[in-house]
Amino acid sequence: MSVHIDDTGAYVIDRDPTYFGPILNYLRHGKLVYNKELAEEGVLEEAEFYNITPLIKLIKERIVERDSKSTQQVPPKHVYRVLQCQEEELTQMVSTMSDGWKFEQMVNIGSSYSYGTEDQAEFLCVVSKELHTPGSGLGTEQSHKTKQQQQQQQQQQQEEEEASQEEEHEEHEEQEEQEEQGGRQTTPNEWLRE
């Protein structure tokens, strides 16, 4: 740092006055006070320029605290579904919920169905599921149809692989049979050439 002195004997420091205010306040009071719109990195730059070690440490701690608050995970998204069921199906439906679905609410919508002489009560059940996704916090859930399609594709690929393996196995057995019979068999095209 080169030292410049003006005609009156005052030291001339060519730095941004915007960030000097918090430095001056810290030197006066021992506390870091600054306007929230002021970038902490700018104040840190000035503190490093003047080599004020306790202030440098304090600003770095605040920057880390600020950054950790801004990178905290966003709250998970929820998917809600409304399921319609009859009284006799209710227990089974609630007890067989899986894959993170949880029961939220049940609404009795009366009985619109009559089985024999008995009326069956009908319910709407609200269930929810949290969607956890990395990154943006936005997620999509595979639909039941998409899952079924993927399972069908996997099954079809497996069947094709098995068929291919079976075909290769049969060809291999035919070759072994031909070798065991002691010779090579000729094809009709080879007969013409001979």
Image: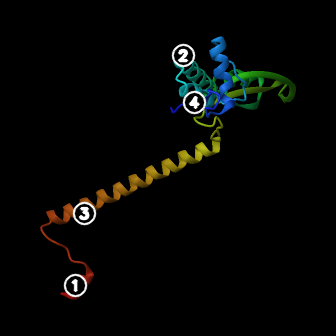
Q: What residue sits 23% from the left and 88% below the top?
A: 192
Q: Tell me which label, 1 or 4, sits earlier in the chain.
A: 4
**Residue at mark 3 to residue at mark 1: CA–CA distance:** 21 Å
Q: Work out whether residue 76 can be spotted.
A: no
Disc marking residue 174:
3
| Separation of residues labelled 4 and 3 (CA atoms) | 81 Å
**Residue identified by numbered label 4:** 45
Foreground mark, 4 or 3, reads 4
Of labels 3 and 1, earlier in sequence is 3
Q: Residue 179: name its quadrant.
A: bottom left
Viewport quadrant of the C terminus: bottom left
Residues packed near mark 1 inside 10 Å, few (<14), some (14 to 19) or many (20 plus): few
Amino acid tagged 3:
Glu
Q: Looking at this rendering, what residue extends furthest in the front direction?
A: 7
- Tell me how far mark 1 sits from mark 2, CA to CA: 99 Å
Q: Amino acid at mark 4?
A: Glu
The tag on residue 117 is none
**Residue 157 at what x, y percent from top left?**
46, 52
Q: Nearer the viewer, residue 157 or 2?
A: 2
Could you tell me which secondary element the residue under label 4 belongs to?
helix
Q: Mark 1 or mark 2: which is in front?
A: 2
Residue that mark 1 sits on: 191
Residue furthest top in the image: 29
Disc 2 on helix, strand or loop?
Answer: helix
Disc 1 + disc 4, Cβ < 8 Å? no
Looking at the picture, does residue 8 appear above or below residue 151?
Answer: above
